[in-house]
Image (cartoon, rainbow, N blue to C red):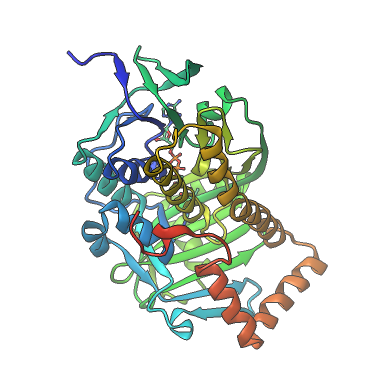
Amino acid sequence: MQSKDINADIVISGAGPAGLALSALLGQAGFDIALIDAEIPAPPQDKPSGRTAALLNGSVNVLKATGIWDDLKSRATPLKIMKIMDDNGDNIGVEFHASSIGHEQFGYNIPNSFLKSALLARIGKIKTIRHFAPAKLQSYDIENGKVIARTEDGRTIRAALIIGTDGRNSIVRAVANIDAKKHDYGQMAMTCLIEHTKPHNFTSTEFHRPGGPFTFVPMPGNQSSIVWVEKTDDAKKYLAMKREEFEKAIQDRTKGMLGTITLKSNPESWPLMLLSSESLTSPRAVLAAEAAHVLSPIGAQGLNLSLRDIASLAETITDAARLGEDIGSGTVLARYERRRRADIKSHVIGIDGLNRVVANDMTFIKDLRRLGLKGMEKIPAFKNFTMHQGLNPDMDQGRLANGQPL
Ligand SMILES: Cc1cc2nc3c(=O)[nH]c(=O)nc-3n(C[C@H](O)[C@H](O)[C@H](O)COP(=O)(O)OP(=O)(O)OC[C@H]3O[C@@H](n4cnc5c(N)ncnc54)[C@H](O)[C@@H]3O)c2cc1C
C-alpha cells in the first residue's frame, strides 16, 4: 500500500494544462514533484474537443521543452493569417499575415483534449513525478521551513515549495491569503467544432459583435473550432436551440466565408470572468496560470500568458537550485514575481479593456473601434509592430519561450 506521508521537493496543486506542463519541465530537470489534482484524469482522448487553444510560437516552444511536440504536432493546425472584423456588414477589418514578418505561422490551434492527453502521457514517463488524483488540496501549513500540504483523501506532503496551478478557485491562493480582483462579465463562451465547404486557408477570424466576439479558428482539413461569446441570457437561448437552428445561427455569423456549415460536436459553454491576484507569492507558495489570472477568451491570450508564467517559474526555480539556493525562499519567489508582473498586468488590463470596448454598443465607441481597425489596416508599420509585439513582447520572455533549453 502507498504511504500517505510523502516527501517531495515541490507540491504542484492542479493538473490542468499549466500544472501538467510545469510538472513536466521541473520533473525533467530532476526535481521530485508531487502533483495533485481534485479530479480523476480523463482517459487518453482520440477525438478533438470543441474547446481548443490558439497557442503562439513562444508557447509552442514551451510545449516543445516539455517533450510533447513530436506527438502533438500532427494534431495541431498552423495559424498563418489572423483577421479581426467589425461585424457591421461593411467588411471593416484588419488582416495580419505571419509571412509579412518572416514567420511561417503565428502559432497553432490545438484541441484541449489532445493537449491534456499528451501532457498526461508525458508526465507518466517521468520517474521523478508522482501524480495523485483524485487528491484535492484541503490546506497547507508551514513548519520548520517546510510546506506541509494536506489533501482531502488524507495525504500529507512535505516540500520546500507549493505551487498553485489549481485554477480560478485556487485553494493555494485562499490559504496563502492572497486577494484577487474579480469581475463577472455576465457573458458565456460557446464552443464547438464545425465542418465547412470552403477552405479556411489557415486563417483565424474574430468578428467583434455587441454581445462579444465570434471567432473561427482553423482545424485540420475543412474544419474549424468556434468560440462564440454572448451575454449569458442570450447564450442560454442559443444553447437551448435545436441542432439545425444552432447550425443556422453559426452559418449566419460566418457571413458565408466558410461556405455551408455542419456542426461536428455538441456545443459546450463556459462562464467568463476577469480575475487578477494581488500578488503571485506568499511564504513558500507561488501562483501561476488561472490561479493568478483569468482573462476573457477575446484575443486568445489566457493559456499563452500562463505558459509564460510556468516557463519563467521553471527557469527561476532551476537557476536557484543550480546556485544552491533554497527554492522556496522569499528571495527566489520574488524573482519570479518581478519577472512576471508587467506581462500579466498589461494583459489583464489590455484584454479587459478590449472585451469591454468590443461588447459596447454605444455609437461613439463603435465608431472609435472601427476607426482603430481602419487605421491599423492603413499603416503597415504600425500593423507590423503590433504583430511583433504579439509574438515577442518587449519583456523578459525567458529561455524556454525563445526555444532555448532549461
Ligand atoms: C472558451 C475559451 C477559449 C479559450 N481559448 C484560448 C486560446 O485560444 N488561447 C489561449 O491561450 N487561451 C485560451 N483560453 C484560456 C485557456 O483555456 C485557460 O487559460 C486554460 O485552460 C486554463 O488552464 P489552467 O491549467 O490554468 O487551469 P485549469 O484547466 O482550470 O486547471 C486547474 C486544475 O486544478 C484542479 N484543482 C482545482 N482545485 C483543486 C484543489 N483544491 N486541489 C487539487 N486540484 C485542484 C482542477 O481539477 C483542474 O484540473 C480559452 C478559455 C476559454 C474559456
Tell me where residue 375 appears, x and y as whole percent. 70, 82
Between 86 and 162, the one nearer to me in the picture: 162
Q: State whether residue 187 is above or below residue 330.
A: below
Quadrant housing the N terminus: top left
Relative to 176, residue 322 above or below: below
Which of the two residues, 277 or 260, is positioned nearer the viewer here? 277
* Nearest to the observer: residue 179 or residue 367: 179
The residue located at (25%, 41%) in the rendering is 123
Q: Is residue 367 left or right of residue 210?
A: right
Q: Is residue 129 left or right of residue 325?
A: left
Residue 32 falls in image quadrant: top left
- Does residue 330 appear to the left or right of 357 in the view shown? left
- Which quadrant does ligand 1 occupy? top left
**Residue at the spot 33% in from the left edge and 58% down from the top edge:** 405
Q: Does the rendering let one see residue 41?
A: yes
Q: At 49% from the left edge and 37% from the top edge, which residue is drawn?
A: 167
Q: Position of residue 309 (x, y in %)?
A: 49, 49
User: Is any atom of residue 245 visible in this view?
Assistant: no
Q: Residue furthest front?
A: 324
Where is residue 170? Give x, y as percent: 52, 31
Number of numbered discs: 0
**Residue 18 location (% of width, % of height):** 41, 44
The answer to whether 309 is drawn above or below residue 256 in the figure is above
